[in-house]
Amino acid sequence: MTADRKRQAREKFLLGGVVGKAGLSKADRAFLLGGLIELARVIPGSAEHRRLRDIGDKAFKASSRDTLSPHIEENAGWR
């Protein structure tokens, strides 16, 4: 495996961990993508960006067993 492919694989692994940390590992992919598209529209440095970043910082500092999104209970399928 080339160094570039290893870097890409690690990046995907880490992003998957973020999804799990948010309690969204069982969420529908379309839901996740829609949410990420909305997040991409948030202007860096804006009040909303800072608010969401603060939430994320707190989540990373919390226990890995904390469930942040308990309303996502079942996998709706990977369509």
Image: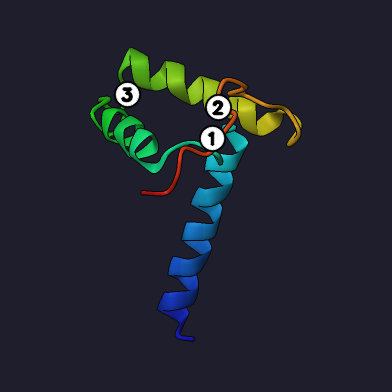
Asked if residue 77 lies left or right of residue 41, the reply is: right
Q: Provide the residue designation for mark 1.
A: 24
> Quadrant of the rendered structure where residue 73 is?
top right
Disc 1 or 3, which lies upstream in sequence? Answer: 1
The residue at the point 42 percent across, 49 percent down is: 78
Asked if residue 17 lies left or right of residue 39, the reply is: right
Q: Provide the residue designation for mark 3.
A: 45
> Quadrant of the rendered structure where residue 37 is?
top left
- Total marks in image: 3
Evaluate if marks 1 and 2 touch, with contact meaning CB atoms under 8 Å apart.
yes
Disc 2 or 3, which lies upstream in sequence? Answer: 3
Could you say which is closer to the camera, residue 45 or residue 67? 67
Amino acid type at circle 1 is Leu
Mark 3 lies on a secondary structure that is loop
Disc 1 or 2, which lies upstream in sequence? Answer: 1
The residue at the point 27 percent across, 25 percent down is: 42
Q: Mark 2: few, some, or many residues within 10 Å (few <14, many ≥20)?
A: some
Q: Which callout, 2 or 3, points to the residue nearer the camera? A: 2
Q: Identify the image's colour scheme: rainbow, by chain, secondary structure or one colour.
A: rainbow
Q: Where is residue 26 in the image (x, y as percent from the top left)?
A: 55, 39
Evaluate if marks 2 and 3 touch, with contact meaning CB atoms under 8 Å apart.
no
Q: Which callout, 1 or 3, points to the residue nearer the camera? A: 1
